[in-house]
Amino acid sequence: MTAPFIHTEKNAPYIYLTHLAALMPCVVFAVFAYGIRAIILLSISVAGFMLTDIVAAKVIRRHIKGEYFDVSSIVSGLIFGLLLSPQTPLAAVIAGILFGSVIVKQLFGGAGSNILLPATAAVLFVQTIFPSSFAEFSKPLENWFAIVNLVSGKASVPDYSELSYPEIISGFAGSLLGVSCCLMIILGLVFLLVKGTIRIYAPLGYLVTLLAGYPLTHISTVFTADGVHSYILFILSSGILFVAVYCLGDYTTVPSRPLSASTAGVVCGILTLILYGRVPDVTMLTAPVVAVNFMSFVLDYFSKSISRRDKRSREVDVL
């Protein structure tokens, strides 16, 4: 068989498998930094999303046969787990899985059809019904074998002001399970770029907006020593790099066209700056992504209209 019947290896399972591989450095760091709690939370998140997706899909779409293995369930579970606090109670994890899998994903058509990223919507849901889970953060490399936090949700509050820049870059500013180590996130980004399975427009628009916007919104303090320290901590350890790579790089819920994707990234960055310091960090990270997911089809529609007008204009100029 010859052209135009040309196929590419970059189908949905391949894309999700590369994203799964790209998440592994963050998983390794989470286990290294938080020990048994990370292993339990990530295992439950992945197994829960897989099991719930399989059961819900069979119940909701019983008439559909021969679906491929849904690798997106594993990816959703890992992203969800990595966005959790190390002391998130197990009841909150299960509630988030049920909401993200059944309500957000399966009721809207399953893999490739959901309008919201299940993981970020699930984390936002958990933060809403279990806000105390994200009120404090455990310090990395402390209490590696402690699991009592998974029941009580309590932890100490690390002092960020005393952290050195190498500690910040290495991810030792106590935060969500897998979002604070920028080195691991950059490693995952490089892998996705090499494999060609990430659309860079939305992540780039998001990061450029935050890098340029933060000094403008903190102009009175950013040029002081404490201000520079806070700026570096925000960029490298707040989780925005994780959101840029693994949430705004999603093929299903982020606009596909360069113009609309870039616009989505900019809007997400602006919303993040507005929320920063006014809401919990996890809300600052996930709420803008959910908002942009809702806007994606509108942005794609206007981007398509602009492209069509430009094409017609070029055709008229040629004539």
Image (tube, grey):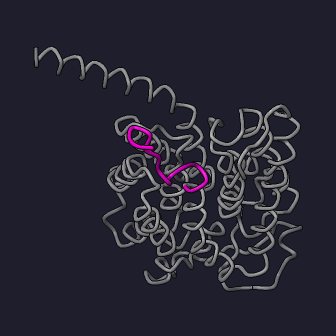
Residue 105's place in the image compared with 186, above or below, is above
The magenta stretch spans residue 2: yes
Residue 88's quadrant in the figure? bottom right
> Residue 188 magenta-drawn?
no
Q: Which residues are magenta?
A: 1-14
Q: Nearer the viewer, residue 294 or 232?
A: 294
Q: Whole-percent x and y of residue 98?
A: 83, 47
Q: Is residue 234 left or right of residue 85?
A: left
Q: Is residue 53 left or right of residue 294?
A: right
Q: Determine the residue positioned at 56% across, 56% down.
A: 14
Residue 168 picture location, percent across and down: 49, 77
Is 67 rendered above or below residue 17? Answer: above
Question: Which residue corresponds to the image point at 84% horizontal and 69% vertical from the top-left?
Answer: 150
Magenta stretch, main secondary structure, is: loop
Residue 64 position, x and y percent, is 79, 34
Q: Residue at x 55, y 44 (%)?
A: 289
- Give coordinates of residue 242: x percent, y percent: 53, 61
